[in-house]
Image (spheres, rainbow, N blue to C red):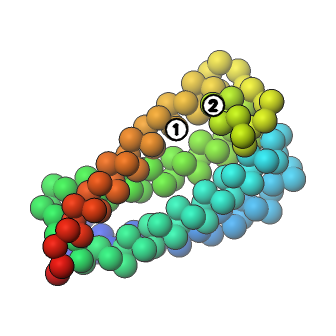
């Protein structure tokens, strides 16, 4: 992908994720676990804003090409995986790894494994992405 377009693509992805979060808000009552669906709604809105902000500051990041590529991939994966994990937990009535949002709901072992894998990988991706952002902002442009 053309390096100059990545910031714009992040803004587009963020706007899409924000919209997805808003749409999830409409289906909250229809899910198996509405409280987890509310979490998914909030994750979509907040992560959408995160991607849009990252897209707006993209040109200020002072990183090598490889680090910029990694940051883009980590940020997009982490934000979308967050919404997917919480939405799956809401629909399945799963999410034992998130007891505050899931309450007493617990899915099948396979469902719980899918959610745990998503949560684990997205957590690492988001930490790595934000470390790269901080490194990229260490010097003024």
Around disc 2, counting alpha carbons within 10 Å, would you say few (fewer than 14), some (14 to 19), or many (20 or more)? Answer: some
Q: Which quadrant: the N terminus?
A: bottom left
Q: Position of residue 114 (x, y in %)?
A: 56, 29
Residue at the image point whose x is 65% and y is 27% from the top: 111
Furthest residue in direction left, as rendered: 64
Q: Are marks 1 and 2 in contact (CB under 8 Å)?
A: yes
Q: Quadrant of residue 115?
A: top right
Q: Which mark is residue 97?
A: 2
Q: Position of residue 66 (x, y in %)?
A: 16, 55
With 56 as the anchor, is 114 left or right in this view? right
With 96 as the anchor, is 76 left or right in this view? left
Q: Position of residue 73 (x, y in %)?
A: 33, 53
Residue 120 versus residue 4 in the image, above or below:
above
Around disc 1, counting alpha carbons within 10 Å, would you say few (fewer than 14), some (14 to 19), or many (20 or more)? Answer: many
Residue at the image point whose x is 37% and y is 48% from the top: 127
Q: Which mark is residue 119?
A: 1
With 66 as the anchor, is 38 left or right in this view? right
Q: In the image, which is nearer the foreground, mark 1 or mark 2?
A: 2
């Amino acid at each position: 992908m053309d390096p100059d377009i990545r910031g714009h693509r992040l803004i587009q992805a963020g706007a899409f994720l924000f919209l997805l979060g808003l749409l999830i808000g409409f289906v909250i009552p229809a899910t198996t676990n509405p409280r987890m669906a509310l979490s998914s709604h909030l994750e979509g809105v907040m992560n959408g804003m995160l991607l849009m902000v990252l897209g707006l500051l993209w040109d200020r990041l002072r990183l090598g090409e490889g680090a910029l590529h990694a940051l883009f991939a980590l940020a997009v994966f982490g934000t979308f995986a967050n919404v997917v994990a919480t939405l799956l937990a809401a629909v399945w009535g799963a999410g034992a790894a998130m007891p505050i949002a899931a309450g007493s709901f617990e899915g099948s072992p396979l469902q719980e494994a899918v959610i745990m894998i998503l949560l684990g990988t997205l957590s690492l991706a988001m930490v790595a992405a934000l470390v790269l952002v901080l490194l990229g902002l260490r010097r003024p442009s």
